[in-house]
Image: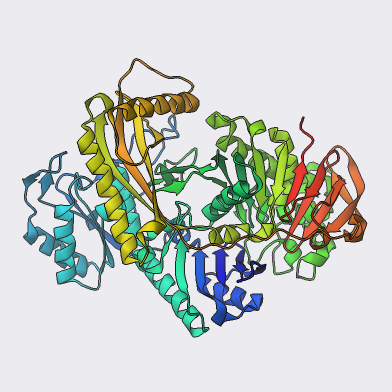
Amino acid sequence: MRVATDIGGTFTDLVYVDEHGDIGVAKSPTTPPNFEQGVMDVIEVSGIEKEAIHTFIHGSTVIINALTERKGIKTGLITTKGFRDVLEIARGNRPDLFNVRYHKPEPFVPRHLRLEVEERLNYQGEIIRPLDREQVKSIVSYFQQEDVKAVAIAYLHAYVNPVHEQLTVALIKELWPEVHVTASHEVTKEWREYERTNTTVLNSYVKPTAASYINKLQGGLKENGVDSYNYIMQSNGGTTTFAQAKETPINMVESGPVAGVYGAAVLGELIGETNLIAFDIGGTTAKCSLIDKGEVKVSTDYYIERSERSAGYPIKVPVVDIVEIGNGGGSIAWIDDAGSLKMGPESAGALPGPVAYGMGGTKPTTTDANLVAGRLAARNFGYNVDLEKVKQAIHETVASHFDMSVEEAALGMIRIADSNMLNALKLVSVRKGYDPRDFTLVAFGGGGPMHAPILAKELGVKKVVVPTASSVFSAWGMLMTDLRRDYIQTYIKRLGQLDITEINQAWAALEQEAWQQYEADGLNREAVIYTRFADMRYVGQEHTVKVQVPNGEWQAETFAEIVERFHQLHEKTYTFRLEQTETEIVSLHVTAFGKVQKPTLKKLEKTDIPVSEAIIESRPVYFEGKGWITTDVYDRHKLSPGASFEGPAIVEERSSSTVMHPGQSLTVDEYGNLIILTGVN
């Protein structure tokens, strides 16, 4: 049995697939700060036989939480002489350009813990000045006095030749074996001194936290009788072992959200949809990502805490290109200083949760608004819902301020939340040169199916797919993942000056490094598959585009093919191409997949049960521009493949509801997915 668990801000989800291909799901409240307990709870709630778990895959928000909440470990930085303040200097391209009071983000390592050592390599990796080992020993002694718990090492040009970083790591481990150490070449071999240094620091900062969490999780599994192969979801859309995750936990920064994106790609391949927008609404956030021709977009230009007023912190590791905003089911309604209604980013979370939960929450949320508008049913909450208390909260916060009815206020809250989500969807589609009419929206998470049909219509998307087990779809996506590792090496060469033998050797070296790591994990060579990319640009440019390039031995004619691919991608991304301008490679990127056995999804048997028997009730639902409409509510589990009906309608399942608006239609496909036509011509 394969089991996947995903820790969200409000709930911890579980999906399992047994040896017969049958799928089961479970949800349990997330248990901060002891998140591993939520995993044990949801396994218990699921009722599965723990001894039958063969493969366990886990996604978590532990790393991103530790970074954003500043709950990492006291960290020291060792760097090349003259580069102590690289974290302080950062970049000059600040987002709030005309703010004279702008402050750069505060480095995670204070200046007194950023120390320099005599050593120097040139840009080709040749040693100019040997490493001063005595200075390293002195720094170690100082860090011990300062009670430092983790050390980051980032030397100039170590991405080309890590010899001095390797010597420093060996010396520190000899002098101070209990400290956690990260060298920059272990997490990234790309240039950009500031980004590489910051990534190394953040990895060190969360390394003890990640090790402690993974050890507790592994211990909890063993105590509960689970003897399984254990994997962690990474930000690049693949999985890795618990052991590797403890060494480079920064690769888990978007561990949970990206699984749903990858799951959407797998589902799209299954149902013949290769152009997709994955749309996930949870209790705290809404997330979306675009999949073009079946390809999940991955980038190393990732930032945390970046906003229109803050430059944020760069993390130079492969992360699925995802837009995330603070708008989920638990997003709180509030009135700003100008008197305008806002939704989020503050969330009620799991505790106290929305007012409807009756757990102490007093501020109205998106979930409360959907309940008042009739889109959610109180019976599905798992709590004793006091609807009058919910209405009172909306009245006090929103309705009284605008002198409107509670129902109008609830709809206003929903529309503000929808507007925020629509902007996020535009960021991954329209603003990147894609026409949403060419894509299908895959909606999941607890709130995705509820908001997606109307958002898709506004965006111009013709079809929405609500997958089976939509509320736990990110966990489902983990079941479909392979092992994945990305190997990126800065390699600055003009295409016209490339030596074929040299670049073939560079590709071979990256693939050999990948194979050696997978071989250590016990995989056969036949199970490892490589995909190559090159980050390319026109000579003189700053930005690059990632171009998929051929595998195998390159020939002279390969260059022309690669250049044409680059021109096409550059024009698609930036609207122009410069065919007479010379091109150059900046980085080589090998993605190595370790193929593992995954479950085969079964088609559902069609029954003769009429659609009318799936109707639970008819209740008033408030729609914009239509007012209250008596709407049929269907039990999703009673809908057979081939079932179809027109909107307005609501399809309920555990932890989620799909809201169809007037003029929309729904069909259930052979896998049990809900296929909604939005009414866009």
| Residue ID at (54%, 62%) | 598
Q: Quadrant of residue 12?
A: bottom right
Q: Is residue 476 visible?
A: yes
Would residue 443 be found to the left or right of residue 547 on screen? right
Q: Position of residue 365 (x, y in %)?
A: 71, 55
Q: Camera-side residue: 175 or 187?
A: 187
Residue nearest the viewer, comparing 344 with 665: 665
Out of 171 and 550, give the one closest to the viewer: 550
Q: Quick one: which residue is furthest to the top in this view?
A: 580
Quadrant that contains the N terminus: bottom right
Kindly indicate the quadrant of the structure image that contains residue 439: top right
Residue 589, x across and y down, in percent: 34, 43
Q: Could you tell me if residue 316 is visible in this image?
A: no
User: Image quadrant of residue 438?
Assistant: top right
Give the residue at x 42% y 28%: 565
Display colour scheme: rainbow
Q: How many numbered circles are shown?
A: 0
Horizontal relation, residue 149 to residue 174: left or right: right
Which percent across, then down, holds residue 145?
20, 69
Residue drawn at x 69%, y 68% is 360
Vertical relation: 595 (above or below) 511: below
Q: Is residue 443 left or right of residue 412?
A: left
Quarter occupied by the C terminus: top right
Q: Which residue occupies 7% across, 55% down?
A: 132
